[in-house]
Image (spheres, helix red, strand yellow):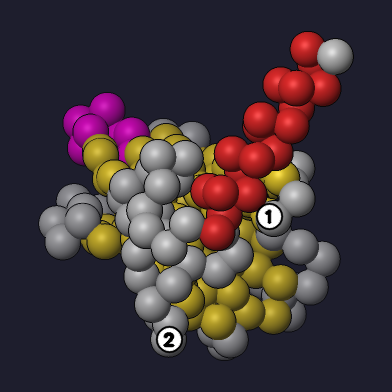
């Protein structure tokens, strides 16, 4: 009985979060931090299509990179009207790392690849998804994205 009540409260909360038009406490504000000397980069926020003002789907993503390993881990959680979808974890490769930019690429599905560009001076993250074509970095970007605060585009 108590477990059922807790479950009902959790589902009600998540439905309210997903339908909320403003930034919700469950989705983080955009945040980018890096330690150039240690070669560490951390980003959190919500991906939004560059052509729209809203985040789609309703999700939150973190990206953690290590320059010496030339690796990044991307973790995404999607919220739906029926609750949380499984967490998606992708391993990405650092293609380049300078004092101002980090370029990250990787295959996140059988037929698609992602490419992200982190501008550490402007504190922006943009990216895109395109066909894999045997390469980790898509040459043709079909869907352009930007990292934003919670539900704001």
Mark 1 or 2, nearer chain start: 2
Residue at left 68%, top 61%? 107
Query: Magenta residues?
Result: 35-41
Q: Is 102 positioned to the left or the right of 8 in the image? A: left
Residue 77 can be seen in this image: no
Mark 1 to mark 2: distance in Å? 22 Å
Q: Is residue 149 above or below residue 42?
A: below
Could you say whether the residue bearing mark 1 is in a helix, strand or loop? strand
Residue 51 is tagged as 2
Q: Is residue 147 magenta?
A: no
Task: Say which of marks 1 and 2 sits in front.
Answer: 1
Residue 41 can be seen in this image: yes
Residue at left 65%, top 69%? 113
Place of residue 74 in the rendered image (x, y in percent of width and height, measured from the top left): 55, 45
Q: Is residue 38 magenta?
A: yes
Q: Nearer the viewer, residue 97 or 33?
A: 33
Q: Which residue is mark 1?
A: 80
For disc 1, the neighbor class at 10 Å (few under 14, some 14 to 19, many from 20) is some
Q: Is 132 positioned to the left or the right of 60 in the image? A: right
**Which image quadrant for residue 110?**
bottom right
Q: Nearer the viewer, residue 8 or 29?
A: 8
Place of residue 101 in the rendered image (x, y in percent of width and height, measured from the top left): 27, 59
Q: Nearer the viewer, residue 121 or 60?
A: 60
């Amino acid at each position: 009985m108590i477990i059922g009540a807790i479950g009902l409260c959790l589902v009600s909360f998540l439905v309210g979060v997903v339908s909320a038009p403003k930034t919700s406490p469950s989705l983080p504000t955009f945040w980018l931090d890096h330690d150039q000397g240690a070669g560490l980069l951390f980003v959190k926020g919500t991906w939004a299509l560059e052509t729209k003002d809203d985040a789609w789907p309703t999700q939150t993503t973190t990206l953690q990179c290590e320059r010496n390993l030339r690796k990044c881990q991307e973790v995404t959680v999607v919220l739906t009207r029926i609750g949380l979808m499984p967490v998606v974890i992708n391993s990405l490769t650092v293609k380049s790392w300078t004092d101002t930019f980090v370029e990250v690429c990787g295959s996140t599905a059988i037929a698609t690849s992602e490419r992200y560009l982190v501008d550490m001076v402007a504190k922006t993250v943009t990216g895109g998804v395109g066909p894999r074509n045997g390469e980790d970095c898509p040459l043709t970007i079909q869907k352009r994205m930007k990292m934003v605060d919670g539900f704001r585009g």
